[in-house]
Image (cartoon, rainbow, N blue to C red):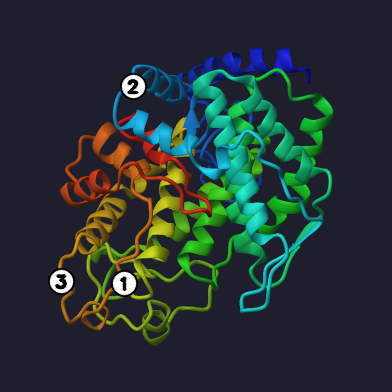
Amino acid sequence: MAAAERRGRAGRVVVAVVMGLVLGAGGVGCGGEDGEGDGVRRARAADLPFSHPGVLVSKKQLDRVRAHVAAREEPWFKAFQQMRASKYAANDYTAKPYAVVACPPDLRPGRGCVEEREDALAAYTHALLYNITGDRAHAAKTVQIMDAWSRVLTRHTEANAGLQTAWAATSWARAAEAVRYTYDGWTDGELLRFERMLRNAYLPQVRDGSADFNGNWDLVMADATIGMAVFLDDHEAFERAVRHFRTRVPAYFYLKSDGELPVSPEGSDITTGAQLRTYWFGQKTFADGLSQETCRNFKHAGYSLAATAHIAETAWHQGVDLYDETKDRLRAALEFHSRYQLGAAAPGWLCGGEVRRDMGPDTEVALNHLRGRLGLDLPQTQRLTSQQRPEGTDDLFVAWETLTHAENA
């Protein structure tokens, strides 16, 4: 598809999505069955086009960010300066691709792990810079980085391959989506090569999730899957990610309505009370908002929160309201962790009275929806987010979300 045709298609897709929802062709609350007739509710009609750009950040959001930065309004202008001053925004940034990325779970040195994550974040950073400043050199840099990897990468190996693949794929999909429909310099050959890389070296590694690992693994895999699905116009992969969200999010954030014990992750062998308590890092008392990894550390709980919000946000841009299905659970988890991250003393029943307050820049996307779109009160999360702004990057898969999502419904 020629670049001009790709740009024109973006506008037609938005119209098609609106018409599809009006005509009841899928989307929010669709009660139809999948193509195999097994009773699984589809998130959206299989023939309903995706809205582009629509991976985490929409065209309207990008337009608002550009206007905020041009007017030097806060917190967006400070967040923009933070991004522009980062190593990922360097004009001479040079990709360091590997044919095989090997990421062991222990102290053995990896090959290409840091380089892949950083290059994907750099591609996304330059894609945002292009959309905000209009400087085509940034779009060209995004394409250059992505093409460097798509020319050589073949696979991911070692035990951390799934997590590594997911981290990188989330940023690749966001970067590619942000330039594909706004920039005419990405040649068809380069685009096809990049699509082939995602389909062969990334999507198979993450689309089935990982029920026997911790929540942050499972959810970032779904985050990567839904992002690639939208970029690749892959309806089957999109449905996989949505089903993953619906069956796994309840297993990683507790509500009292779940019962005495947390929900068991679908597809896992973690079913008994003893197994669940071990899985929840020894926690025996469960309260609204507790995460499966709270007693490990807040950093990993934060990864799960960020990935959950990313999935729901991308689905939202595609007319599927996953937020509605999980807003109470997500709100409780955000408020629970924000309260203790802000310094509240941990009671004895919580992780033996000791918690690791190392939560990262993981709150903006969910806060924007729950407070900004729905008008819900999240005082602890709002206070923590305000203190952390501008929320930058965790150097893994979260990047520049004060810039893209702060009060940006």
Residue type at mark 3: give it: Ala
Residue in view at x 57 percent, y 25 percent: 130
Q: Residues within 10 Å of mark 3 (few under 14, many from 20)?
A: few
Residue 81 placement, left or right of 50: left
Residue 319 seen in the current view: no
> Could you tell me the amino acid type at mark 1?
Arg
Q: Position of residue 184 (x, y in %)?
A: 70, 17
Mark 1 or mark 2, earlier in chain = 2
- Residue designated by label 3: 345
Mark 2 residue type:
Arg
**Secondary structure under the numbered disc 3 in the rendered image:** loop
Which quarter shows the C terminus? top left
Spatial CA distance of label 2 from label 3 is 38 Å
- Residue beneath the point at 17% across and 43% down: 377
Position of the N terminus by quadrant:
top right
Can residue 61 be seen?
Answer: yes
Q: Which residue is mark 1?
A: 356
Circle nearer the N terminus (2, 3): 2
Mark 3 or 1, nearer chain start = 3
Q: Nearer the viewer, residue 370 or 298?
A: 298
Mark 1 and 2 residues: CB-CB less than 8 Å, in contact?
no
The residue indicated by pointer 2 is: 72
